[in-house]
Amino acid sequence: MNEATPDAARGLQAPLQYLKGVGPQRAKLLSRLGLETIEDALFFVPSRHEDRSRLTPFRELAEGIAQSCAGTVARINAPPRGNPRVPLSVTFRDGTGYLTAVWFNQPYLADKFEKASERKQTVFLFGRTARFRNGPLQMQHPDYEVVEEDEDETLHTGRLVPIYRLTEGLPQRWLRSLLWRVLDEHAPRVAESLPEALRRRRRLSALSDAVRAIHFPQTEEEFATARRRLVFDDFFLFELGLAIRRQREGRQRGIAMAPAGELGQRLRQGLAFRLTAAQERVWEEIRRDLAAPHPMSRLLQGDVGSGKTVVAALAVLTAVEAGYQAAVMAPTEILAEQHLLTLRQWLPPLGVPVELLTSAIKGRERYVLLEGVKSGDIPCLVGTHALIQEGVEFRRLGLVVVDEQHRFGVAQRARLREKGDNPHVLVMTATPIPRTLALTLYGDLDVSVINEMPPGRQPVVTVARPEGQRAQIYAFLRQQTTEGRQVYVVCPLVEESEAMDLKAATEMADRLQDEVFTDLKVGLLHGRLSFAEKEAVMRAFKEGQIHVLVSTTVIEVGIDVPNASVMLVEHAERFGLSQLHQLRGRVGRGPWKSYCILLESGGLSDEARRRLEAMTQTNDGFRIAEVDLELRGPGDFFGIRQSGLPEFRVADLLRDGRVLEEARQDAFALVAADPDLQRPEHRALRQALLARWRGKLDLASVG
Ligand code: ADP
Ligand code: MG
C-alpha cells in the first residue's frame, strides 16, 4: 500500500497554474471547471469515454445510433454569410466512403476544418447518424476532435479516450494531455483512505489505481472497476458522516414514554375504520421508539392517502398521556389548518385540546396562545415554521411531528430538537422517495413505510387531453355530478405571484358558474382567504353543497373529500410531477371510480411531455418519484444542494443504488465498532472524512 506523507498530500493541493504549459490564462479557464489544484484535476472524472480503438468505417455506420468514426476532410460547404438557417456542412472521407456532418450557427468552424484539410489531419467524430429526405446518412452537431500529426497518438487515438466537460477556449486535446501528465506524476501519490480489510472484502481497487483508470483505462472492465471504487468512496464517506451523527443522537438521553395507551385505545374505538396491517406495523415501530430512553428520529413514508395522519395522532396521544406536549408542524398554512381540522375531530373528544399557531395569528390571540403553550395547558400545538421561531416556549415538549419534511432542512430539524429536552421526532412525507434518495437525504433517520392503501381504494384513471376537448370534458364533469359525485378544478401558478394565481382561479370559477354549470354550485378556494373562510368553503364542499370546487394549488395537500371523483388540472404541463401526483391523490378516496384529467395547453417541452406520460402510465407514487428524480436530477430534487450535505464526485443515485447499500452497511458497521474513528487503521479514513464534509459535520471529537 502506498504510504502517503503529509508532504505528498500537500503536493496534491498545489495550484495547477504553475504546471508547465498552464499559466495564468489557462488557469483561469480551468478554474471555471472547478479545477484549481492537482487534486481537483485527479478527480475530474471524464463525462464519457470514446473507444477509438474500434472506429466504425463510414460504410458500416448504422442509422440512429451514436458511433465513433474518423476521416479526413474532403469538402467544406460554408453557409452564406449571415444566413443562420443554412448549416456548415463538411464531408469527410475514410478508406470506405464518405460522411457528411452539419453544424448550425457555428460558421467559425469552417476555418478549423479548412486548416485540418490543408494539413491532412485526421478528424474524430462522435455522434448520432440520421437520414434526411432519403439522402445519405448525416451527423448533426457531432463531437469532433482534430488530431495533430505530431501528437502522442497513444493518448488521443487507438484506445479508450477520455472526453471531458469543457469550457469555451479550452481545447479537449490540451486538457487531456494536461490530465495525462498530472496523473502520471501525481496519481501514485494519492493516499489510500479505506482500511485494507474493507477493501479486500469488497474487492475494491487501490485509490491511486482507480484515479488513474477512471481517466485512462485500458479496457472497459478496468474503467468499471475504477468507477466502482470511486462511487464506493463517495457513498462510504457520506454514510460514514451520517452514521457518526446518528450514533451521537442515539447515545443521547431522551424521554421514555410508555403510558398504558388508554387514549390511543379510545381513539381507535371512535374511528369509523380499522387500521390497515401496514399502519399497525409502523405504529408498533413508532411506539417502541417512543418507549425507549433515546430520542426517536424516524421517517414515516407513505403515498398520498395511505393514512399517515391517524398514526401521527396515536403518537401525539402517547406523548400527551405520558405527560408531555406534542407539536405538529407543516410547511404551509393550509396544510397546518388541515391537520388542525383532522386532529380536532379526534383529540378534543378525548379531552385533549388542539390549537393552531401560524404567523398570521397576531396580537392578543397570539399572546394567549403562547402563554398556554408555555404553561403546558395546550398539549398539542399545530402550526407552520412559526413553531420553531423565537418566542415559542413549550413547558414539556416531548414529540415533534413534521409533515412534508423535504421542505425542511437538516438545520431546522436540529433547531426543533432544542425546543425541548431532546424530543422525539417523527418526520412524515407524502411524497414517496426512491430508496436511494431516502438513504442519502434521511440516512440518519430510521424509516417506516406504509406500503398499503386503506381498503376499497381504486386506482385513479388518468388521461391527458388537449384544450380542444374542453367541451367533452365539461360534459363528462356534468355527468359525474349528475351521478352525485363532486369535482375539483385546479388552476396553476400563472406567474410567481399569488395575485395572478388568484385572478386565473377567480375567472375560471366565474366562467364555470355563469356559462357552464349554471344550475350547479361552483365554489372557489384560494390562499388569500382567511382560515375561517377556507374552512367554510371546505366544509360546504365536504357536505356536498358545492359541486365543482375551483382552486389554486392550495388544495395540493391534505384535503379529504371521498365523494369527489374527478380532478381536472388546468395547464397540467406547468405542474411538477410530484405536485400532479399529490393532486391526483385528492380523488379515488371513496368507493367510486375516479378520474384525473390533465388538460394540456400549447406546446409542451420534452420534459413536460414525459411528466404527463408518467402520470398516465402509473399510479405508483414510488415510480413517479423515480421519474421525477430522473427528470430533475438529484441536485434539484428536494434541494439536496441546499441541504448542507456533501456532493458526490462520481456516484449517480439513479445507477448506483447497489453500491450505496453496501457502503451504508459498511459505514454503519464501522462506526458501531469504532464510534470516533480512533483506531490507527482508521486514521486515513478520518482524514478523508473531514476533508469531504468540510465544516458540514460536527465531528469535533473525531478531528
Ligand atoms: P395521508 O397519508 O396522505 O396523510 P390521510 O392520513 O389523510 O393520508 O388519510 C387519508 C384518508 O384515509 C383519510 O380520510 C383517513 O381518515 C382515511 N383512512 C386512514 N386510515 C384508514 C384505514 N385504515 N381505513 C380506511 N380509511 C382510512
Ligand atoms: Mg397527509
Image (spheres, helix red, strand yellow):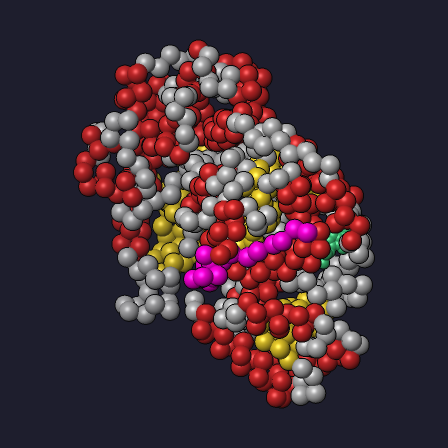
Q: Is residue 187 left or right of residue 342?
A: left
Q: Residue at x 62, y 31 (%)?
A: 256
Q: Quadrant of the N terminus?
A: top left
User: In this orientation, which residue lies closer to the viewer: 468 or 419?
Assistant: 419
Q: Is residue 272 visible?
A: yes
Count every numbered label the image shows and give the total: 0
- Ligand 1 shown in quarter: bottom right
Q: Tell me: residue 133, above or below residue 76.
A: below
* Residue placed furthest toward the left: 24
- The stretch drawn in magenta includes residue 141: no
Q: Is residue 358 left or right of residue 270?
A: left
Q: Residue at x 72, y 45 (%)?
A: 263
Q: Residue at x 49, y 47 (%)?
A: 374
Q: Residue at x 58, y 80 (%)?
A: 509
Q: Is residue 664 left or right of residue 218?
A: right
Quarter residue 555 falls in: bottom right
Q: Tell me: residue 419, above or below residue 189.
A: below
Q: Position of residue 309 (x, y in %)?
A: 66, 51
Q: Position of residue 573 (x, y in %)?
A: 55, 66
Please report the bounds of the magenta region as a residue range.
351-367
Q: Position of residue 656 (x, y in %)?
A: 56, 36
- The stretch drawn in magenta includes residue 359: yes
Q: Tell me: residue 467, above or below residue 645.
A: below
User: In this orientation, which residue lies closer to the viewer: 177 or 618?
Assistant: 618
User: In this orientation, which residue lies closer to the viewer: 314 or 149?
Assistant: 314
Q: Position of residue 30 (x, y in %)?
A: 28, 40
Q: Quadrant of the C terminus?
A: top left
Q: Is residue 206 visible?
A: no
User: In this orientation, which residue lies closer to the viewer: 423 or 104?
Assistant: 423
